[in-house]
Amino acid sequence: MKRIKAIYPGSFDPPTNGHLDLIERGSKIFDELVVAVLRNPDKDPLFSVADRRKMLEAMTSDFDNVSVDTFDGLTVDYALRVEAQAIVRGIRAISDYEYELQMALMNRKLQPALETIFMMPAEQYSYLSSRLVREVAQLGGSIDCLVPELVGQKVREKMDVAHRFEDGEPPVAKTPSEGKSRPRKKKA
Ligand code: PNS
């Protein structure tokens, strides 16, 4: 019987509960799923590719048919290299569709044999994105329900380091529990 291997490419900066939800769904459909972190020299990421890979490996250790890898260049070239037949992408809302459709059609143009499979994450993650997670954390909000615990811990460590080097007063958290994640700097 033909085995179907899929890649799930993305930035994953940082990986979220929405990504994990999609990985779990994908692992049930495909024989093999490779979570592929893009090495993008143009971006200024919060986490290094190595850190993102480690977080994803820890998050997916329970799934026997899921592995994590990194790649650069075209996604379709990477997919061919690892002999995948499908590309998985998540669609949260209609607003994602236009960009995702454009990318899927371009990938099909480049490599007609590869199929893009769109999957929807659970409803509670439909507003969730790595960008918002970074922003909420940077402004002192709680990201506890948005990312796995180990990712939350890593994000908080990053923010602590960033704030230690900041000149001004860090933003004030809205509740005492949110404030726990980061010690405040005293005014000079
Ligand atoms: O998580 P993201 O940032 O939405 O993922 C976007 C990603 C990595 C899937 C996309 O930027 C990509 O495929 N980049 C690799 C370069 C490439 O293949 N570009 C042509 C896409 S049509």
Image (cartoon, helix red, strand yellow):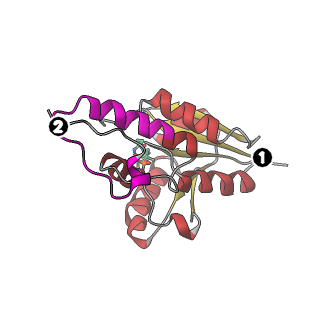
Kindly state the secondary structure of the residue where label 2 is placed.
Answer: loop
Residue 165 screen position, x and y as percent: 24, 28
Instruction: Out of 155 and 81, give the one closest to the viewer.
Output: 155
Residue 112, numbered label: none
Residue drawn at x 38%, y 34% as measured from the top left: 158
Which amino acid type corresponds to the residue marked 1 in the rendered image?
Answer: Arg
Kindly state the secondary structure of the residue where label 1 is placed.
Answer: loop
Residue 187, numbered label: 2
Residue drawn at x 73%, y 56% as measured from the top left: 29
Instruction: Out of 145 and 21, give the one closest to the viewer.
Output: 145
Instruction: Out of 16 and 73, give the one closest to the viewer.
Output: 16
When the figure is inspected, residue 90 is found, relative to residue 6, above or below; the finding is below
Q: How far apart are marks 2 and 1 (CA)?
A: 61 Å
Which amino acid type corresponds to the residue marked 2 in the rendered image?
Answer: Lys
**Where is residue 156, by image quadrant?**
top left
| Span colored in magenta | 153-179
